[in-house]
Image (cartoon, grey):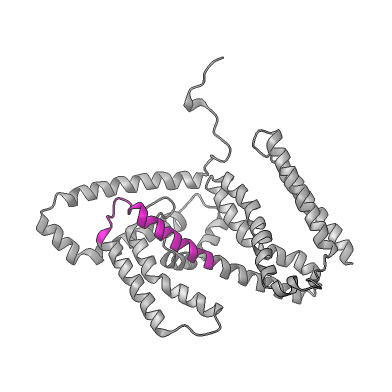
Amino acid sequence: RKKLHMSKLPDPPGSKHSSRVLRIIKRQKERQYQRRQEGGKSDQLPHSQQTQFWSIELFSEALYELGDHFYQTIYVDILSNKLLSKFEWHLQCMEIPFTIIRKFVIPIPLFEGEYNRSMIAFSIALSPIWLLHYLSTKLEDEIDVRVMIVAMLTSFAAGVAVIRFCDKTTMMPLKYGIVVAIYGFLIAATWIDVISEHLVNLLELIGVLLRIPSPVMGMTILAWGNSVGDWTTNGALAQRGLADMSMAACFAGPSFNLLVGLGLGLLTQKESLMSEEGLNVTFMPTVRIGFIFLIVNCIAAIASCLYHGGTIPKMYGYAFWTFYFAYLSMSAQHLM
């Protein structure tokens, strides 16, 4: 048998990158090279000039890095991007204000694979503004003013520390990057929660205006609205070449909702569960049908993976859609 060279071996499933990701990787390498050149020039300055540079021009340099980041992100990648279709261009133009706000309040150590010290510092400093606004909409009691002041001062000091002590050409140490990534993940989760909540409210309004019965609306429109967050997140992972992670998240999300969400819900009814009568639960026909189709779907996915060597062909996607529409039709018959 002929042994194939490593470069000639086929790519594993889920390793294909979209053209957008390849452009981002190429641009990232070019910017890293330019920053290394600028970093080498600054290292050759005398110690007295470097001290003056850090003390006087530090803030102006951070603003310049921030402006360059938004110039590349907004003007180059969106406004002057000829590779976008007219529909994509108009959608991304409408998204620009939300993109700017999101970047200023969600700390991410790497923005689309690129390290930007100033963007991390400003997002850490301004993140409590969004976080306090989010908590004010979720909590019944008002947030103490002293807590708000402490949070703002702490985040501002952390942002200044990032600009002062982190290098602009090399990434921050891993132990600090992990903390920033976890903090940014929590804030990003609040964004997903707010967007999903507004989408569900909008879908409820559409159902009321169209006079759709509540069981049908809960089975269709509200179910789709609750799944929008998972759909957008998993789709973004797949577009970035992380198909395996996206596929795992499609099954891990509903499993978490069923096991953890249902478990916590039953814990709130502990007194009823421990009583002699127990907790009365109505097992509706639509729920029973949903469980049956969910089990069939999972078994079909596992069988297709085993049969095709760890991959799921495109035709099975149509089969999964068929399962879903069959579930809708059978549930609708029970509701009528």
Is residue 298 shown left or right of residue 36? right
Query: How far across and down, in percent of the image, does residue 82 sit?
Result: 48, 51
Is residue 299 shown left or right of residue 125? right
Q: In this orientation, does residue 62 appear? A: no
- Please say if 26 is above or below 111: above
Which residue is pictured at 62% across the width and 71% down the height? Answer: 197
Is residue 330 shown left or right of residue 244? right
Q: In this orientation, does residue 309 appear? A: yes
Q: Which quadrant holds the N terminus? A: top right
Query: How far across and down, in percent of the image, does residue 318 sit?
Result: 74, 46
Residue 287 falls inside the magenta stretch: no
Quarter-wise, where is residue 284 in the image?
A: bottom right
Which residue is pictured at 47% across the width and 27% down the height? Answer: 7
Residue 170 falls inside the magenta stretch: yes
Query: Closer to the camera, 262 or 203?
Result: 262
Query: How far across and down, in percent of the image, does residue 70 sit?
Result: 38, 61
Quarter-wise, where is residue 91 in the image?
A: bottom right
Query: Closer to the camera, 73 or 151?
Result: 151
The count of marks equals 0
- Please say if 219 is above or below 81: below
What secondary structure is the magenta-colored segment mainly? Answer: helix
Q: Which quadrant holds the C terminus? A: bottom right
Query: How far across and down, in percent of the image, does residue 8 sit?
Result: 50, 26
Stretch of the chain drawn in magenta: 165-191
- Please say if 55 is above or below 135: above
